[in-house]
Image: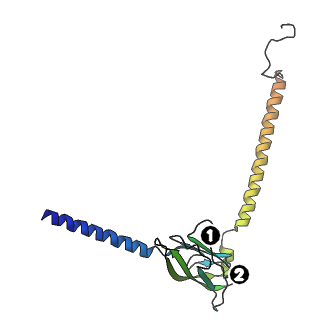
Amino acid sequence: MRRLLMRGAAVLALALALSALTLTSLSSEELIQAEPHPDGVTAETPHNVVLTFDRGLALLRDAHHVEVLDEAGHRVDSGEATVSTYSTRTLIVPLEGHAEGELEVRYSVLFSTAGGGLDQVRGSYTFTVNPTIAGLEAPSAAASETKSSQGLVLWTVAILIGVAFVGALLYFLRLATGNARSSLEPQNRTPFND
């Protein structure tokens, strides 16, 4: 009887483990991050749409298809979706021109499976380009970069002036105290004591 219960528990544990693996493999083909964010609002048309998935994409030419459509249904993307050289989980889609309003991103991507096959995943999301919010956004990165480089130059100049001031002060103190000789010279040495 005890042996039968142990076998039943082992079979139940195995069934739970297999179902957990199946659920994990089914849910591992999803978009985990997108830039611009789904349902997000930007002040201007981004230069790229970046899609990141939770596992590596198939590294095959023309395996991935992404369309970015404006409200009229016209494509605003370049038609080239490339896997990032930084991460095989990331797909980069350059955008062309200027678009306003709601934009729809439609994607169809391929993932390599452990058995050497391919899985296809399709999906879509929308984001909005609204130029009227441009004044409400934070200062641009270029402006903050200019400020930070100016600050770096000012701090460098201030440090150099401080070092020069301390050096000059030490020099004049040595002159004022009559100790103008180097501390590395031997004391009480005359040319006749050799």
- Residue at horizontal 79 percent and vertical 43 percent from the top: 160
Q: Secondary structure at mark 2?
A: loop
Q: Is residue 150 above or below residue 122?
A: above
| Residue type at tag 1 | Ser
- Among all residues in the image, which is located at the extreme right? 191
Quadrant (top left, top right, bottom left, bottom right) of the C terminus: top right
Q: Residue at x 87, y 10 (%)?
A: 191
Residue 78: x percent and y percent? 68, 81
Where on the picture, by quarter, is residue 105? bottom right
Q: Quadrant of the N terminus?
A: bottom left
Query: From the viewer's perspective, is 178 left or right of 33?
Result: right
Rendered location of residue 173, percent (x, y): 81, 27
Q: Residue at x 25, y 69 (%)?
A: 12
Residue 130 falls left or right of residue 164: left
- Which residue position is annotated with label 1? 84
Disc ID at residue 187: none
Please state which of residues 89 and 6 is positioned toward the viewer in this rendering: 6
Q: Which amino acid, by three-letter code, is at mark 2?
A: Glu
Whole-angstrom CA distance, mark 1 to mark 2, is 19 Å
How many residues crowd mark 1 within 10 Å: few (<14), some (14–19), many (20+)? some
Which quarter of the figure has residue 107? bottom right
x and y percentages locating residue 148 in the rendered image:
72, 58
Rendered position, 14 above or below 175: below
What secondary structure is marked by label 1? loop
Residue 59 image position (x, y, % from top left): 58, 72
Q: Which residue is mark 2?
A: 96
Instruction: Using the rendered view, name the quadrant where residue 162 is placed.
Output: top right
Q: Going from the N terminus, do you reach mark 1 or mark 2 first?
A: 1
